Amino acid sequence: MSIYLRNIIRFIFLVLIQVLLLNKIPLRWWTAPGSLPPYTPFIYPLFLLLLPLSTPVWVMLLSGFALGITVDTFMDTGGMHAATCVLVAFLRTRILTTLLPKRLSEYQNTAPNIKSMGWTPFLTYSVVLLAIHHIVYYITEIWNFQSVGYLLLKVLVSLITSMLFVVLYSLLFSSSINTTYYDK
Amino acid sequence: MIKNSNTMQGADIVSSSNAVAGYVYKKQNDVVYYFQLKRLNDSLLNENARLRNELSALSDIDTFRDVTARIPVTIKDTTTKKDSAGISLTPTGAVKIIKYADFRYIPARVIKNSISNDRMNYITINRGTEDGVKKGMAVVTGNGIVGRVEHVSNHVASVVSVLSDRKVSSKLSDGTSGLITVWNPGTPEYVVTEKIPLHIKVKRGDSLFTTGYSFFPENVLIGTVSKIDTLKTTSTKNLKIRLSTNFRNLQYVYVVDNRMAKEREQLEAQNKQKD
């Protein structure tokens, strides 16, 4: 499968998962027991995270905007996801350069995933970017600094569940994880 | 009383009422719908029973008795008539009055629901301009309020729910009106009514209704008082209201077409021009 087709399919697939499944999670009362505020896990930024390493910055920014505005359309948030996604797309390059040993342009045809990076670096990378995404998104959404505790609680709960789904996604959809079986 | 402000999002295209998003949500709802039929049946049965009780109590009184002016509901007379020579005439098209009503209810199915946003929660319904839904119409359920239509396309509409910064003009069951109810973010179950003078007697369990000042029809239940906070410093009371609408599982809603709305808006616009 060509790299373009693969990413377009992933775009559609992740947006559909986000919109049709994850956005329904806060509707169930047992997802937020007690006085926990209703929260939504976000898995769709994973599309930006999984783009090839050698993607030029302008493509990153454009695809970030396209992704954000698509999700905005479905969630009626009118540009908040778009703004957040453009920021994430911009910061991705910075974070990858600090995490990876070589220059990004030297990685041809590799995407940041569990196989190419290994579990720990990949999870660090996705936690950092998703945390940025969640913090920026919830700040723009709540836009009220009187209740910082509430904001942090919401970011934290949302981030933990998002990471759960990111790990699940990586386990399910990377056919290329190094699983070695030893024959006796 | 009526908050007419626009949302921060002005553009209609970036909203779930556009064709593509509406299509996706409709397709999903067609699938999920079957799994909710049992619960839906129960809720419709309850509502039916309630309406039957109400009807028997008010059999010869108009339900919206406080409204003074009434607009006739009309139909075109399409029965063919024959003249004395036996030649059938085309339908006359004469207007015939059937009954009087101020509100028309358009049933709609909720195809997208959201409660987790902190400032604006939107609901998408599967009725649009072709079904008579217009911007600014009120949306209610069988036993509570839902919100107001914000964006409309041909077959889908998105509704700003009460879970937003939109204020609702409300009154207590004893008739104390002029209260303003607004959502307090963090939970989809409660709204708050603030700054009630101390002399007004409220107790837990009292009901709160909409008033005729707002875009909602009059006397629609908002919820019941679940907590009363007395503030000595400002000598006011704050009420915490438990919403009668369960926003977590909204399935059917009614869009309220107020036949008086246009006339009323024109009148109110005249007042504004004079000011």
Image (tube, rainbow, N blue to C red):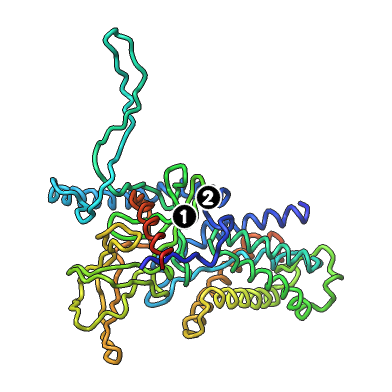
Name the subunit of mark 2.
B
In this view, the residue farthest toward the top is: B85
Residue B196 at x, y = what percent?
27, 79
Name the subunit of mark 1.
B
Name the secondary structure under disc 1.
Answer: strand
Residue A115 at x, y = what percent?
73, 67
Quarter of the figure with residue A77 = bottom right
Residue position marked by numbered label 2 in the rendering: B22
Left or right: residue A134 compared with residue A29: right
Quarter of the figure with residue B170 = bottom left
Of A20 and B47, which appears nearest the observer?
B47
Crowd rating for badge 1 (residues with CA inside 10 Å; few <14, some 14–19, many 20+):
many
Q: Image point 44% across, 66% down: which residue? A: B115
Of A172 and A92, which appears nearest the observer?
A92
The C terminus of chain A lies in quadrant: bottom right
Crowd rating for badge 2 (residues with CA inside 10 Å; few <14, some 14–19, many 20+):
many
User: Can the viewer see residue B177 in this picture?
Assistant: yes
Name the secondary structure under disc 2.
Answer: helix
Q: Which mark is residue B249?
A: none
Residue position marked by numbered label 1 in the rendering: B124
Which amino acid, mark 2?
Gly
Q: Is residue B147 above or below residue B77?
A: below
Q: Image point 35% across, 67% down: which residue? A: B168
